[in-house]
Structure formats: structure tokens, C-alpha cells
Image: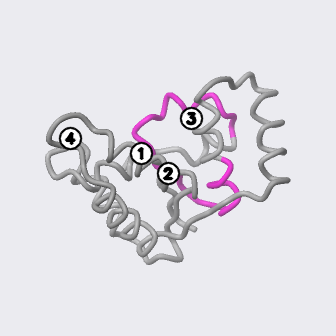
Amino acid sequence: MKAFLDTSVLVPVFYGDHQHHAASLDLFTRFPKKEIGCGAHSLLEVYATLTRMPGKHRISSEQGMLFISDIRERLTVVALTADEYGDMLQTFTSLGIVGGTIYDALLAACARKAKAKALFTWNTRHYAQFGAEVLSILGTP
């Protein structure tokens, strides 16, 4: 897999007025499905974010599902098995990862599982603490 997108890249794809829209959309559409992916958890994060945005940016559950369908159509969705979840937790908790940052660690583990050559995020600071293997593929769109 050439590219793996985290949630911070996926959300701007659906908002034309977002500062990261153009770069995120370009990356979202650049590769064929077999060469680009996201974590299964990102489907939930994107849905939760889009349906709870403030003011005019909030969308309905139906529209949220249309956007999730777009993601599933364009990207390979990568999930961990129960054993891989356990291993991931062991690895990242040994690095001192606590709180909600573990969800970014989950996406990093999915990117590693997919053998992604690049993990794209707008939150590089979150991923910088996940070790050299993640740092070596980390980038912004």
C-alpha cells in the first residue's frame, strides 16, 4: 500500500471551505483503491466528527453515511484482529501512550499492518511518539 490516511486527512475531504480540503482531496483521489487505505476505526471517527461539527458544518446521519460510503468505495479499510489489538496495546502502552492518543496508535498499527509506505496525517505531533518505524513513514498531504 502506498498511502494510509488518518482521520485528520479524511474529514477535510468533505468540506470545501476547510483549510486542508484541497490537499486532502488530492491525496484521497490520487491512488487506486488497492494502493490507499484507512483504519476501520476512522470510519467511526469521521462519522462522529461530521455529524457533530458546529453550526452550518454539521451534517445529518444520512449524509454522514453517504460520506462513509465514499470512503469505503475509494479506500481499502484495514482492521486489526483481536490478537493484533492486544499486541498493539502492549507495544504502545510500553511507550507510555495513554488516553485518547491510543486511537492514533491504533491507526498507526493499521498502517503498519497494511505495509503502508506513507502514513498521512495533519497531526504529526501525535504520531511522533510512536517510534522510529512510524516516524519513517509519517507525512502530511
Where residue 1 sits in the image (x, y, percent)? Answer: 58, 68
Where residue 27 sits in the image (x, y, percent)? Answer: 35, 60
- Going by the image, does 69 lie left or right of 12? right
Where residue 109 sits in the image (x, y, percent)? Answer: 68, 49
Residue density around tag 3, few if under 14, some if 14–19, many if 20 or more, within 10 Å: many
Where disc 2 sits, the SS reads helix
Mark 4 and mark 3: Cα distance apart in space:
21 Å
Q: Magenta includes 119?
A: yes
Q: Give, as a single range, the part of the protein colored magenta.
A: 109-132
- Residue drawn at the location 70% of the way across and 59% of the way down: 113
Earlier in the chain: of badge 4 and badge 3, it is: 4
Q: Are marks 1 and 2 in contact (CB under 8 Å)?
A: yes
Earlier in the chain: of badge 2 and badge 3, it is: 2
Where disc 4 sits, the SS reads loop
Name the kind of residue labelled 1 in the image.
Answer: Ala
Name the kind of residue labelled 4 in the image.
Answer: Gln
Name the kind of residue labelled 3 in the image.
Answer: Tyr
Mark 2 and mark 4: Cα distance apart in space:
22 Å
Residue receiving disc 4: 19
- Residue drawn at the location 78% of the way across and 59% of the way down: 81
Residue receiving disc 3: 127
- Residue drawn at the location 66% of the way across and 34% of the way down: 130
Residue density around tag 4, few if under 14, some if 14–19, many if 20 or more, within 10 Å: few
Earlier in the chain: of badge 2 and badge 4, it is: 4
Residue receiving disc 2: 44
Is 79 drawn above or below residue 8 in the view shown? below
Which one is nearer the viewer's eye here, 122 or 136? 122
Mark 3 and mark 1: Cα distance apart in space:
21 Å
Mark 1 and mark 2: Cα distance apart in space:
6 Å
Residue receiving disc 1: 48
Residue 31, quarter of picture: bottom left
